[in-house]
Amino acid sequence: MTAEPMQNRLALSIVIPLYRSEACIPALLARLEQLIIHEPWEIIFVDDGSPDRSHTLLLERLSHSTLQAVVARHTRNFGEHQAVLSGYRLARGTHVVNLDDDLQNPPEEALRLWNHARNGGHDVVYGDYRQKQHASWRNLGSNFANFTTHFLLDLPGRFYLSSFRCVHSSTAKAVSRYQGPFPYIDGLISQITQSIDSLEVQHESRHEGPSGYTLRRLVRLWLNIFTSFSLMPLRLASLLGLAMSVTGVILIAAVVADTLIHGVVVAGWASLLSAILFFGGVQCLLLGIAGEYLGRVLLTVGGKPQSCIRSITRLRNLW
């Protein structure tokens, strides 16, 4: 990969995915404009197919703002990780911080992540929330996603994997080269670097409106963790199948021995039906896991797009 010309290199890029963000944009821009950064920096907004006026309102507000910004617009809603990867591809900063559009990640804390990454020489620094302001069901889902990620992926430490992270440009560009339709940024990071740290940060209440991160999106995230960056589920399925086979052989031997000793006795219908239902359910689960992998391979080989950018608008390109 050729190095970017030094005159085009900025110190910091902040990537902000947008989806149904019309109500949050004025307050978000006001907070961003108050940041004091003495080096060249930029903000990259990625509108992930918002059905409201997010894109139009953002351009209107930025036309009267002092911020240097890039606004990319997806042709439809692809997902948060896809939007962040689009931002990584456009970023020109030596470090890239991505934060949410709802102000739950305070922009001021982004500077703390950035300084921690620079001072410590880390490739990635995650924001570890002091106290999360999400709903209980989402906290539970996020904790489960973190547990499965650490179990399946080769990640150092047990820190919280939040979407509030600072990434060095070399890592961001390496991650952004992934073109598959099922990206999971933390999984990609784990394959690229182990120079990872965390920093305790503030987590605020959502500025306005309900979160767009629904249970359905959490389930899709779990599926990405399970099937896109690890073969562990297939290996566990193989071990489970082997254990079931051994159990079946032992039970068959026990039945044959009992028949030879006591003769044929018509009994145990309840236990037989329970065994059939149990083993049948496990087999369906294993087939589902294999089918999920196969389906993802089919969509990847078939060229399902990760994302598609409709337009890119640059404002106040002064550096």
Image: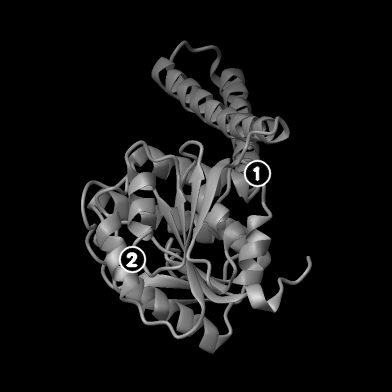
Q: CA distance from mark 1 to mark 2?
A: 28 Å
* Residue type at numbered disc 1: Gly
> Few, some or many C-alpha atoms within 10 Å of disc 1 (few <14, some 14-19, many ≥20)?
some
- The residue at the point 62 percent across, 22 percent down is 256
Say which residue label 2 marks: 105
Above or below, 313 against 170 in this view is above
* Residue type at numbered disc 2: Asn
Element class at badge 2? loop
Residue at far bottom of view: 119
For residue 168, the mark is none
> Few, some or many C-alpha atoms within 10 Å of disc 2 (few <14, some 14-19, many ≥20)?
many
Above or below, 80 against 30 in this view is above
Q: Position of residue 103 (x, y in %)?
A: 29, 62
Q: Is residue 186 visible?
A: yes
Q: Position of residue 226 (x, y in %)?
A: 55, 46
Q: Is residue 106 visible?
A: no
Say which residue label 1 marks: 180
Element class at badge 1? loop
Given residues 141 and 134, the one toward you in this image is 134
- The numbered mark, 1 or 2, whose residue comes first in the sequence reads 2
Whether residue 98 sits left or right of residue 65 in the image: it is: right
Given residues 125 and 256, the one toward you in this image is 125
